[in-house]
């Protein structure tokens, strides 16, 4: 299996997010950039054998699921806060 450059790998993850999950380009780019800022892709930079098309798909799925989990958690927190009567005033 051939490996991609680091930049091509990130581009592939971004493209897969738009194709698999119908994300807008800007949203997919932002998600990949946030993961990169959080050093999620450091190991991919260090180990070229992880920069494959198959691994790009795996990472796109993982990033999307993590994003969905964050969104669901935020929604649950907002509902709970609303049920308690809104934010506490200081």
Image: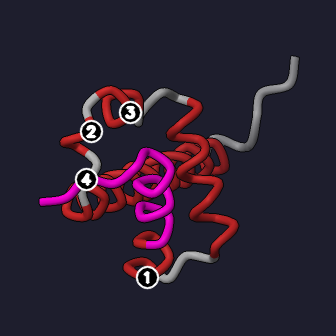
* Viewer-side label of 4, 1: 4
* Picture residue at 50% right of the left edge, 76% below the top: 18
As rendered, which of 53 and 60 lies closer to the eye? Answer: 53
Neighbor class of circle 2 (other Cα within 10 Å; few <14, some 14-19, many 20+) is some
* Viewer-side label of 3, 1: 3
**Label 4 with label 3: CB-CB less than 8 Å:** no
Q: Which residue is mark 2?
A: 48
As rendered, which of 56 and 79 lies closer to the eye? Answer: 56
**Label 3 with label 1: CB-CB less than 8 Å:** no
Give the alpha-carbon distance from disc 4 to disc 2, as whole Å. 6 Å
Give the alpha-carbon distance from disc 2 to disc 3, as whole Å. 6 Å
Mark 2 element type = helix
Q: Position of residue 6 (x, y in %)?
A: 43, 45
Classify 42 as above or below 60. above
**Label 2 with label 3: CB-CB less than 8 Å:** no
Q: Residue furthest right?
A: 90
Q: Which residue is mark 3?
A: 45
Residue 26 found in image quarter: bottom right
Q: Which residue is mark 4?
A: 3
Residue 34 found in image quarter: top right
First reached walking from the N terminus: tag 3 or tag 1: 1
Tag count in the figure? 4
Determine if the magenta segment contains residue 55: no
| Extent of the magenta region | 1-15
Q: Main secondary structure of the magenta part?
A: helix
Q: Position of residue 40 (x, y in %)?
A: 41, 33
């Amino acid at each position: 299996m051939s490996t991609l450059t680091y930049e091509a790998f990130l581009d592939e993850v971004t493209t897969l997010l738009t194709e698999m999950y119908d994300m807008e380009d800007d949203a997919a780019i932002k998600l990949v950039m946030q993961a990169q800022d959080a050093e999620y892709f450091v190991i991919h930079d260090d180990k070229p054998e992880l920069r494959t098309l198959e691994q790009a798909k795996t990472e796109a799925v993982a990033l999307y699921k993590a994003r969905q989990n964050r969104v669901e958690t935020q929604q649950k927190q907002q509902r709970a806060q609303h049920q308690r009567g809104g934010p506490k005033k200081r």
